[in-house]
Amino acid sequence: MTERKIPTIVTGVQPTGPSHLGHYAGIYRNMVALQEREARRFYFIADYHSLSEDYDPSEKSRQIMDLAAELLAIGVDPKKTTLFVQSHVPEHTELCWILNTVTPISFLERMTQYKDKASRQKQNINVGLFAYPVLQAADILIYRADQVPVGRDQLQHLELTRDIAGFFNNRFGRYFTEPKPLLTETPKIRGLNDPLKKMSKSLGGKSYVALRDDPDTICAKLKSAVTETTGILKYSEEELERRLGGPNPALTDGEGTDLCGQAGAYNLLTLLKLAGGEREARLIMAGQPIRYGELKRLVAERLSDHFADFRQKYEKFREDEDHLKEILKKGAETAGKTAGETLKEVRKLVGVR
Ligand code: TRP
């Protein structure tokens, strides 16, 4: 009888500033839940990726440590998961170079995230931004991952990773397995100040609730959240999604304001559910008209409570930077062993040394 192979799960998060509810709902919750599975897990902070976007070098190392503390505080457990910083395991970038040589430029030119980012930073369309998905493929393939938990926006990169694995295998012999994305149904979290877009730092401080925000800040941000004014949810959530259409629905002004307000109202209910208030959300839906002032206070309170434990743990981890560094160092050592083995075999396959 052959031994059942334990799957390998790999995922990365970029250090770009305080994590918010979108990160939590989209990926962090999933990362924590996946720790209950029998698997080898590698979670890392994708610091090299984050250099491809405009950033301030004096802030980067703090952002890396902040993210490490956030991931630990939310429940990533170093006993169950190898947690490390991407740049501490140089095999990622070495494999990336080799993968560059089997990746057609035309495949990278199709990446929607590249096109989006390039249009946002026209003065800084650098090769790193373009090759970003190749480094991501290396992150995944260096551990010969089977499963990659990601948000929907990363599906195209995952598909490219499988293509790259295939190109490599065709040229050098079957070596890499093709990793699959692990998607769980995650609610879409919308910007508080612009519910037609997803919650994002780039929409400004009033768009998002950071996981580290204190209760007063959470309350203030929710107070200024955009909603409609009638208290009545005109459409079902599915119907609303349909009317909003693709990423850029062509709407008349009036229609746009209306749908925006409706989306904002649903967003508040989504946040309430996210903080464990499913029952309350159902009651509010059933008891329309909705009084938004009250709802906003309730959501703020539930969110504050839901992340109280996180805030405390975050502060604790953040206070002891030596401890944090020790965890990351151990993580890099463990990851480096597997990564080193892969790279050694790959180097042989491609004919160097
Ligand atoms: N591109 C991912 C994001 O922005 C981050 C990332 C980098 C990643 N390397 C990865 C995710 C490898 C999964 C696997 O969310």
Image (cartoon, rainbow, N blue to C red):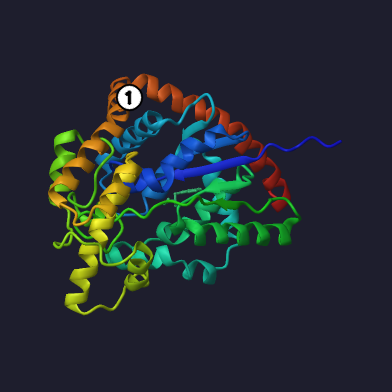
Q: Please give the residue where the numbered disc 1 appears in the rendered image.
A: 313
x and y, in percent, of residue 13 in the image: 42, 44
**Residue 6 falls in image quadrant:** top right
Q: Position of residue 122 (x, y in %)?
A: 29, 67
As drawn, is 333 to the left or to the right of 62? right
Query: Can I make out residue 290 in this image?
Result: yes
Instruction: Give the amino acid type for the residue marked by disc 1 in the picture.
Output: Lys
Compared to residue 199, the image places residue 76 above or below, namely above
Query: Camera-side residue: 260 or 329?
Result: 260
* For residue 129, side relative to residue 342 (left or right): left
- Count neighbours of disc 1 (C-alpha within 10 A) and say few if under 14, some if 14 to 19, many if 20 or more: some
Residue in the picture at 18% in, 57% down: 289
Quarter of the image where the N terminus is located: top right
On the image, the x and y values in percent for residue 93 come to 52, 46
Would you identify the image quadrant in which residue 342 lies?
A: top right
Secondary structure under the numbered disc 1 in the rendered image? helix
Q: Residue at x 42, y 49 (%)?
A: 49
Q: Determine the residue located farthest toward the front in the rendered image.
A: 287
Q: Position of residue 209 (x, y in %)?
A: 24, 44
Please tell me whether residue 318 is drawn above or below residue 28 in the rendered image.
above
